[in-house]
Amino acid sequence: MVTYVDAATVPRRNNGEIKLYGPDGFEGMRRAGRLVALCLDAVNEIVRPGLPTQAIDDFVYGFAMDHGATPATLGYRGYTKSTCTSINHVVCHGIPGDKPLRDGDILNIDVTLIVDGWHGDSSRMYAVGEVKRAAERLMEVTYEAMMRGIAEIRPGHHTGDIGYAIQNYAEGERCSVVRDFCGHGVGRLFHDAPNILHYGSRGDGVMLKPGMIFTVEPMINLGRPQVKILGDGWTAVTRDRSLSAQFEHSVGVTETGFEIFTRSPGGLEHPLRRGA
Ligand code: MF3
Ligand code: CO
Ligand code: CO
């Protein structure tokens, strides 16, 4: 059974209830979302062949400190970094380290910044130097899949409509949808109800209501959907080692549709449409 509660009156834990946020919540998410989007814009300036992913993590940590924000992943369930950096066949939760980026890599950078208690959660793909046509296509398909999922968001639609739109489009492009990770409620909490599956059928799941806030963050593979977790306990990779891509926005349900809190102020959220 799903219940709905006023976000202002409930304890700050995930007890399965779906919170409905008012104007203050939306304003808080606008500020957190804008900052994480500015951070992901700024990261564009440093991504290049030869850069260790730890340098990206250091940059994001510094950006957060400079703007009075806290990276939500620091200390989260034992995670010790400010970002996840997921390269090529890494699906998600890649741990920044000393290995340098190489020409032709595609890379997801996922950042969650806490601003005045609100969590802005977003990720984008980055191309390192010249990338292959197949990698470009995967990034295009994944971005389009996310945006088609978001376009389903309006009161009266269901979470399954989001998943259906993503899966139907991605599989039509001969790609596959990762099942092992999903989007999530976000706001005062990093990970909250409801789960947002990136696959499914129209009408499945919970009905969307104005005031809900959650992420849409599909992981799409060029090959098969299966993943495995490496020995570090975090890094998820495709079992068939095919390329994987992901984009993520934090979104609110409005009276008439949706509001994306993490849009790029610089128009930089799409890796192949970034100004020279
Ligand atoms: N930001 C990720 C998400 O989109 C979660 C990362 S949790 C971590 O939900 F611990 F791996 F960083
Ligand atoms: Co997320
Ligand atoms: Co994220």
Image: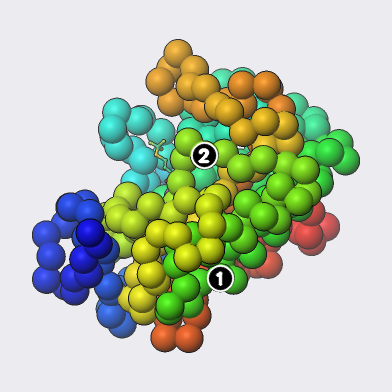
Answer left or right for 121 relative to 52. Answer: left
Residue 181 shows in this picture: yes
Occupied quadrant, residue 175: top right
- Residue 85 coordinates in the image, percent (x, y): 55, 35
Which residue is the site of mark 2? 179
User: Residue at (80%, 32%) from the top-left corner?
Assistant: 104
User: Residue at (38%, 69%) from the top-left corner?
Assistant: 207
Q: Count numbered badges in the picture.
A: 2
* Disc 2 residue: CB within 8 Å of ligand 1: no
Residue 27 shows in this picture: no
Q: Give above or below for 216 relative to 227.
A: below
Farthest residue, direction right? 133
Occupied quadrant, residue 215: bottom left
Residue 267 versus residue 185: which sits nearer the camera?
185
- Residue 167 coordinates in the image, percent (x, y): 63, 51
Q: Amino acid at mark 2?
A: Arg
Mark 2 neighbour density, 10 Å: few (under 14) some (14–19) many (20 or more) = some
Q: CA distance from mark 2 to mark 1?
A: 19 Å
Answer left or right for 6 relative to 97. Answer: left
Answer left or right for 36 relative to 207. Answer: right
Disc 1 secondary structure class: loop
Q: Dividing the image into 4 quarters, which one contains the N terminus?
A: bottom left
Which residue is the site of mark 1? 152
Q: Amino acid at mark 1?
A: Glu
Verify CB contact (< 8 Å) between mark 2 and mark 1: no
Residue 140 versus residue 26: which sits nearer the camera?
140
Farthest residue, direction top? 231
